[in-house]
Image: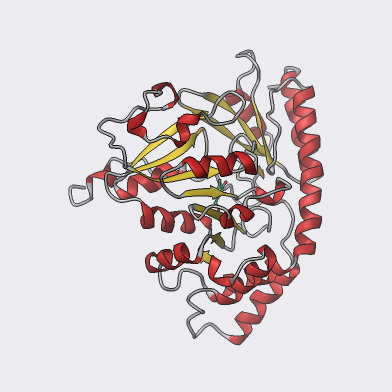
């Protein structure tokens, strides 16, 4: 298609996790919540539907901003709503990164960031995590100032000192489930010449978060989603927390009505039900600990997870991650097989209900004992 911009033609495009037909498989592949969202969210959707949808929603999602502000101890003008956090990430990339400029992300992590750079006609630089899932000091340096090329996944040419415009850091990270401490993140932000987005899609499972750091460093932006911990992946709602000056700029970039009346009402009701969040998160964290311990007992290397999934790798090539993935799939359990160029492959398993997690573990054990 010669009409299409060259950078779009050259893109592979982001490929979301498999979504099997209803009832076809137990989904442990995209880190959704196995439990039903707060009933208050469903009630809110019904109330809006009864009232009718003939009017535009509030363009800023003001009701949600006020509810989230009170949960996080900030003012409503520190919050911006998005149609899923992927929308928030798109808005941020469009706000900060122009054609030919540079976006940095750790590797292996969330692949979407790279696609967002490609859409902008920008470049992205993937910096490898160290073996203990911390980051080299290179992560905060200007690309032209250092020769530490061993940390780069694919070296870039002609990078100028001030090309770096935005950094993405998922914390906890996916696929590893590991996290950096608040102290480490503040140090990274303080050393960077540009804004840094801490993607906290999984922070509710981590026991701590970086929201407080937004007040300590104006370059820190927090991205959140209702898809994982609030069990509302089908709703599409995410938000960011940042300084009001930053939020005001992103408002110019977002679609005027990027969140609909149903999702604003449901997300508002959900975030006001912190009791539901605490109880559900505790169940998932308990199951995660069992999943993690059992996978380690079975012989897998599993970094300590602070999310609602574990990252599982066999220590040598005697067990094929891909064959195990196919065996689980054949038996009705869908997990995520990931293969990262230059890093290797492994299985990311989302925490399910206790029953589903146990059945999945029993299948893994059967596979290791020779079942095919
Ligand atoms: C799931 C996920 C998101 C996307 O969340 P949505 O709000 O559903 O778009 C963002 N970042 C990371 C790291 C994720 O794993």
Q: Is residue 266 above or below residue 194?
A: below
Q: Say which residue appears at 34% left-offset and 44% top-offset.
A: 118
Q: Is residue 24 above or below residue 263?
A: above
| Count of numbered badges drawn on the protein | 0
Q: Residue furthest left?
A: 2
Tell me the quarter of the picture where residue 124 sits: top left
Q: Say which residue appears at 62% left-offset and 73% top-offset.
A: 66
Q: Is residue 288 left or right of residue 182?
A: right
Q: Say which residue appears at 60% left-offset and 30% top-offset.
A: 133
Tell me the quarter of the picture where residue 27 sits: top right
Colour scheme used in the picture?
secondary structure
Q: Say which residue appears at 27% left-offset and 48% top-offset.
A: 99
Residue 17: tell me if it is visible.
no
Residue 81, given in percent of the width and then of the height, sits at 53, 66
Q: Is residue 41 above or below residue 21?
A: below
Q: Is residue 357 above or below residue 280?
A: above
Residue 16, given in percent of the width and then of the height, sits at 50, 46
Q: Is residue 188 left or right of residue 202?
A: left
Residue 118: tell me if it is visible.
yes
Tell me the quarter of the picture where residue 370 sits: top right
Q: Nearer the viewer, residue 161 or 315?
A: 161
Residue 328, given in percent of the width and then of the height, sits at 67, 32
Rendered-image quadrant of the C terminus: top right
Residue 43, given in percent of the width and then of the height, sits at 71, 75
Q: Nearer the viewer, residue 355 or 43?
A: 43
């Amino acid at each position: 298609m010669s009409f299409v911009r060259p950078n779009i033609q050259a893109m592979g495009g982001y490929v979301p996790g498999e979504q099997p037909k209803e009832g076809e498989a137990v989904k442990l592949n995209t880190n959704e919540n196995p439990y039903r969202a707060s009933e208050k969210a469903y009630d809110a959707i019904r109330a809006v539907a009864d009232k009718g949808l003939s009017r535009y929603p509030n363009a800023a999602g003001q009701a949600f901003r006020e509810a989230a502000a009170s949960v996080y101890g900030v003012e409503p003008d520190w919050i911006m709503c998005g149609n899923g956090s992927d929308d928030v990430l798109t808005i941020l990339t469009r706000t900060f990164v122009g054609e030919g400029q540079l976006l940095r992300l750790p590797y292996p992590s969330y692949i979407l960031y790279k696609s967002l750079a490609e859409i902008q006609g920008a470049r992205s630089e993937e910096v490898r995590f160290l073996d203990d899932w911390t980051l080299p000091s290179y992560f905060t340096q200007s690309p032209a100032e250092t020769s530490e090329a061993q940390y780069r996944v694919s070296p870039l040419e002609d990078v100028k000192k001030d090309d770096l415009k935005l950094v993405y850091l998922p914390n906890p990270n996916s696929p590893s489930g590991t996290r950096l401490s608040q102290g480490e993140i503040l140090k990274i932000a303080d050393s960077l010449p540009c804004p840094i987005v801490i993607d906290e899609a999984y922070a509710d499972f981590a026991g701590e978060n970086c929201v407080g750091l937004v007040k300590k460093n104006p370059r820190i932006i927090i991205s959140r989603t209702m898809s994982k911990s609030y069990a509302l992946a089908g709703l599409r709602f995410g938000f960011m927390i940042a300084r009001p000056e930053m939020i005001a700029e992103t408002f110019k970039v977002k679609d005027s009505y990027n969140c609909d009346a149903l999702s604003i009402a449901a997300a508002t009701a959900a975030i006001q039900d912190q009791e539901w969040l605490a109880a559900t998160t505790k169940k998932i964290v308990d199951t995660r600990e069992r999943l993690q311990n059992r996978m380690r007992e079975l012989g897998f290397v599993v970094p300590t997870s602070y999310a609602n999934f574990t990252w599982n790798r066999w220590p040598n090539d005697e067990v094929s991650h891909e064959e195990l993935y196919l065996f689980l799939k054949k038996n009705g359990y869908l997990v995520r097989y990931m293969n990262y160029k230059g890093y290797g492959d492994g299985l990311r398993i989302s925490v399910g209900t206790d029953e589903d997690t146990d059945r999945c573990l029993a299948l893994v054990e059967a596979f290791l004992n020779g079942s095919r």
